[in-house]
Amino acid sequence: MAGLDDYLSIKLSKRQNEGLLRTLKHPASLADFCSNDYLGLARSQELMEMIQSAFRQLRPLRNGSTGSRLLSGNSAYHEEVEHKLAGIFRSDAALLFNSGYTANLAVFSSIPGKDDTILYDEFAHASIKDGARLSLAKKFSFFHNDLNDLEKKIRRSAGRIFIAVESIYSMDGDLCPLREIVRLAKTHDAFIILDEAHSTGVHGGSGSGIATELNIADQIAIRVYTFGKAMGIHGACVAGSEPLKQFMVNFARPLIYTTAPDNHDLVSIDCAFAYLSAHLELQKQLAMQIKLFRRHAEGVPGISGSESSIQTAIIPGNESVKKAAHALQTKGFDIRPILSPTVPRGRERLRICLHTFNTEQEIVELAAALAELVAIGESDYLSQ
Ligand SMILES: Cc1ncc(COP(=O)(O)O)c(C=O)c1O
């Protein structure tokens, strides 16, 4: 044991010396500009009461799901929730997963075969890259949102071609050119795998995401939706055809070899979508918050001014961005630095998440604080 701990401690010290040590922290009681609770559903008392009341009425009573979906873990309620999700996402079928991470592992590890090719955006989420790594297919990245590079790589690809993109990129907050990607995929008979993690809830009627909002969902072979962000709860689903669902039930190891979502997960998903459908004004409120921030942060160097609830302020260098985040935290804003190698070196950033519940004053003051921070300049806040 001591030998192992020595080895682990050396690795951790190396990380610490590089300024990259990760630690688990409790959320600060500061103004939340870092969580993915874009619509405030995680903190909604009304939704919480809906979930608790529906949970108490569920029969049969079970605290846990007791097994894999393929053994004792399935129920009529799992299938009912999947049926509802397929309706929301306008797909023939939907398959539940415990998280977006496992949904992506399942899709990428099971569907593209050894003669196929996965082409993924270089800024794709770790779960897409990890899933691709588990696949026997050939895999290549293409430059972020670069249709020319994507087409060049499509032309060089063999077998079935799977193009992996996100509707809203998690670290940059920018949107993928989905219509153009659909056109390109059609030209080359390629299949799109779309991760809607950061658009689920925020876009589309009932929170059904960008593909349905643009009315092109039927052009996309596989769509992944997650519920731990704007939906304020937990879990995920893959939406697509019935054969896609049945294939994953047979071959997707992250579905087969894990305990199924339990009743509390199911009732939370059911209630969160029902709640959002009755409160679609939340999407409009979020759009207003984004506009407000963009108006006040306009012209501040390094600020992305993206169209989504994820904004970034590029502050190159891990130490610089950590100091910048600390400076904002001392002013009352919960903002976290995103370091390399999570993002490319030189593109370290503050990731700023906007929410319906942020007050106008908080947003205006944050924009002013960011402007001040940039004006002070890197050398000054480094020495603070
Ligand atoms: C684009 C993207 N896909 C998938 C995931 C994973 O989702 P989950 O948190 O439900 O595992 C995330 C979460 O950070 C994400 O940003």
Image (cartoon, rainbow, N blue to C red):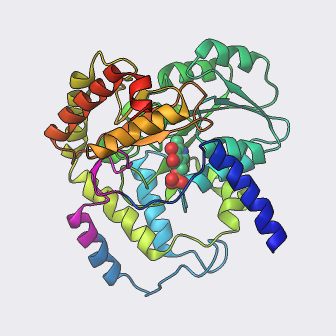
Q: Does the magenta segment cover residue 279?
A: no
Pick out the residue farthest to the left: 361
Pick out the residue farthest to the front: 383
Answer left or right for 98 relative to 365: right
- Front residue of 96/259: it is 259
| Residue located 70% across and 57% down the image | 252
Report the span colored magenta.
Answer: 28-50
- Front residue of 337/215: it is 337
Picture coordinates of residue 303, whole percent (x, y):
37, 23
Mark yes or no: residue 202 visible: no
| Residue located 64% across and 73% down the image | 68
Q: Splitting the image into 4 quarters, where does residue 147 fall?
A: top right
Picture coordinates of residue 255, whole percent (x, y):
65, 62
- Front residue of 49/277: it is 49
Answer left or right for 119 relative to 199: right
Relative to 95, say whether 286 is above or below.
above
Picture coordinates of residue 285, whole percent (x, y):
19, 40
Answer left or right for 355 relative to 167: left
Picture coordinates of residue 264, whole percent (x, y):
42, 74
